[in-house]
Image (cartoon, helix red, strand yellow):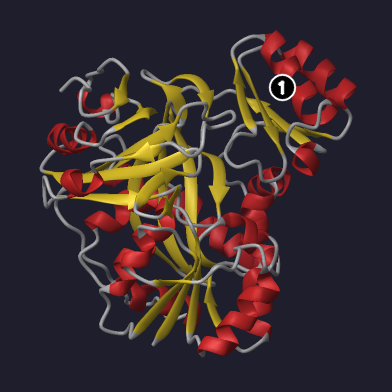
Amino acid sequence: MRVLVIGSGGREHALCWAISSSPLCDTLFCAPGNPGIADEAACVPVAPNDIDGIVKLCKQEKIDFVVVGPEGPLVAGAVDTLEANGIAAFGPSAAAAALEGSKAFAKDLCAKYNIPTAAYRRFTDPAAAKDYIRKHKAPIVVKADGLAAGKGVTVATTTRQALAAVDAAMVAKKFGDAGAEIVVEDFLEGEEVSFFALVDGKRALGLASAQDHKRIGDGDTGPNTGGMGAYSPAPVLTAELEVQVMEKIVLPTVHAMRDEGRPYKGVLYVGLILTKDGPQVIEYNCRFGDPECQVLLTRLKSDLLPALIAAHDGELEDFDLRWRDEVALCVVLAAKGYPGTPVKGSEIRGLDVAAGADTSVRIFHAGTKRVGDKLLADGGRVLNVVARGRSVREAQKRAYAVVDKIDWPQGFCRRDIGWRAIGRRRASAPVSEKAPQ
């Protein structure tokens, strides 16, 4: 098969790495890719949101199967357009991708089909939203309705914070059209975790759990980011709880989407909070998470490509996947300034030495570019260091040992990825050879 992966981040590097090893894959392309992906696939300079350009590329290269990585093209209807042109594509239609593209739609779906989630209200008028917040008081959660690159959610601990979040979204238009409508919902007490499933329109195949670290600072402090690290599986989501998640959330969601005339195919990411009353939905994503994808695929023993094809073809019945009996942990290396305006163009040295230091560790590129023989930072989240181990602690130790061999003083990372599972934190440090061990 001739396969195309759409995207340029760490998630897409992990997807290309997994797909390239499949016996079914004869030739692999990535649009637009990055310098790390170039080791796995032929990178083609077509932007993920250039859907017409992607269709043209598929026809030129006789692509048999497309895997859409980012949420933007999915919400914009990339799969619909590809399929209409006779090109098989993995991912939900635009109508189904509304699960992520509209927080309001997702909340309404949960309410209609009794899928457990926090109580909420929708607002298009900032004054009405503020009146509601003043009456209900903090803690409270304010969410931009549309896509906001993982930064449209404010978990407000004070009423002032919540009111400021309304102004940012609806008055200052920080998130553009994505903040024209907001969702204000009750704050739920509990630990957050993510669960992933492949869906073929009728059935769901549970994959694995992961725990992301959204806040910029150690101990989950500071503003939200796209994700500073993750590990899988998450010990907090026990086998018993996974059964509950499948029976009370994943399968009801799949059936609800079918009944709504929006059959869901692709990977379903369910962001959960484990409350005293059981798991509840925080959000849905319509794609593999980033950096959760990197840890999931590092643990996967089975061939990924046949599973993606089975989901596309509606043939997940009796399908099964095998997983490594190990933990995978990812540390995200980001450029200074992130999650605001990252400083681009700084040189990253020592990557080859770091990559060869431990064969159980992989480095995925997320935001890099090559200029001559130099590797430069070209984004907010720049590199992903992923390690396997028999425990979260062992995987963490291996990951940071490799991080500390990367010479990049203009970058930084959290030093406590996995802390909830192992109860240990380390102080923040620059990413350089002189970083503390």
Instruction: State left or right for residue 319 relative to residue 103.
Output: left
From this view, report whether residue 214 is shown above or below residue 317.
Answer: above
Circle 1: residue type: Ala
From this view, report whether residue 142 is shown above or below residue 371.
Answer: above
Quarter that holds the N terminus: bottom left
Q: Residue at x 66, y 75 (%)?
A: 53
Instruction: State left or right for residue 235 relative to residue 307.
Output: left
Which corner quadrant of the image does residue 426 belong to?
A: top left
From this view, report whether residue 295 is shown above or below residue 75.
Answer: above
Nearer to the camera, 255 or 50: 50
Quarter that holds the C terminus: top left
Residue 10 in sight from this viewpoint: yes
Residue 69 x %, y %: 50, 61
Residue 168 x %, y %: 76, 24
Which residue bears the numbered disc 1?
Answer: 165
Q: Which residue is drawn at 59% across and 68% down?
A: 46
Q: Is mark 1 on a helix, strand or loop?
A: helix
Q: Badge 1, how many Cα within 10 Å: few under 14, some, many 20+?
A: many
Nearer to the camera, 314 or 358: 358
Quick one: which residue is furthest to the front in this view? Answer: 372
